[in-house]
Image (spheres, rainbow, N blue to C red):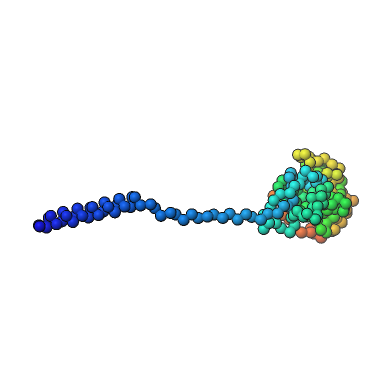
Amino acid sequence: MNMSKIIIIIVALGAAIGAMMLANSLNSTPAPIAQVETVIQETETVDILVASTMMLMGHKVGVDDIKWQKWPKDMVYDNMIVRNEQENKMQEAVDSVVKTQIDEGDPIRFSKLIDPKGGGLLSALLAPGMRAISTPISPETGAGGFILPNDKVDVLLTMQNQQNQNKTRTILVNIKVLAIDQTIREEDGQQVVVGKTATLELSSSQSEILAMANNEGSLTLSLRSLADRNIVGDQGLKQKKKLTILRHGKS
């Protein structure tokens, strides 16, 4: 047998073996794929008290304003109100007064509520160490009536010096307005509060300055921009010195 015939036979045998292996692979059943079981672990929840509607400062909380809502237990903080079968926490919140605005869906905290039996709303709104002092205003001295509670103002004093010249100086800076007359918050989209009295939040030394200035001349409230409310600290001593200089007719 010559070499060419031997090569032909070898190629034929190889082709036959290859065809047989291909047929076996097509007919064989694939091995089952192991199924991965996904286990979803349920998050443990508790019921906390949340606002069912937006409540503005001064709003009296009613039953329809709050509700129980499930909350992840690992996201509950100490100041949140958690449902307790032995205590009626919801009833404790009802009839209280909102100290700072609470948005719909926000957790209710007793730190944002005031018990009306424990004192007035205005005293609860005062920061520690601060006083509420009222001063007469008019549309002309109160930014045309556009000053609202929670705005920040500068207080300007206009008085005559010894030469009978009118001098105006800023005596108090970045002062919070607590109320205009009896209005302590913007209400029903009200954009203007025209009143005769503004109640300001002042430190003890600032209260003395305002009382002194009321007897020295005319006061004007200058409304500050929302973007310009970052001045902090007690300006009392500096402003008292400025008032003394103004009284003696110096520039």
Residue at 72% of width from left, 52% of height from top?
47
Residue 4: which quarter of the image?
Answer: bottom left
Residue 147 vertical position relative to residue 47 in the rendered view, above or below: above
What residue is drawn where x is 85% and y is 55%?
A: 131
Q: Nearest the camera: 77 or 187?
A: 77
Count the labels in the image: 0
Q: Nearer the viewer, residue 75 or 248?
A: 75
* Residue 226 sits above or below residue 191 on the image: below
**Horizontal side, residue 233 vs residue 34: left or right:** right
- The location of residue 67, given as percent across then percent down, is 75, 47
Q: Establish if 245 lies above or below 58.
A: below
Q: Does 65 sit above or below residue 247?
A: above
Q: Nearer the viewer, residue 175 or 218?
A: 175
Q: Please name the residue shown 39% across and 53% down the image.
A: 30
Q: Which residue extends farthest right?
A: 215
Q: Position of residue 20 (x, y in %)?
A: 27, 52
Q: Quadrant of residue 233?
A: bottom right
The image shows residue 251 at horizontal and vertical percentages of 80, 54
Which quadrant is the N terminus positioned in?
bottom left
Query: From where the camera sits, is residue 124 visible?
Result: yes
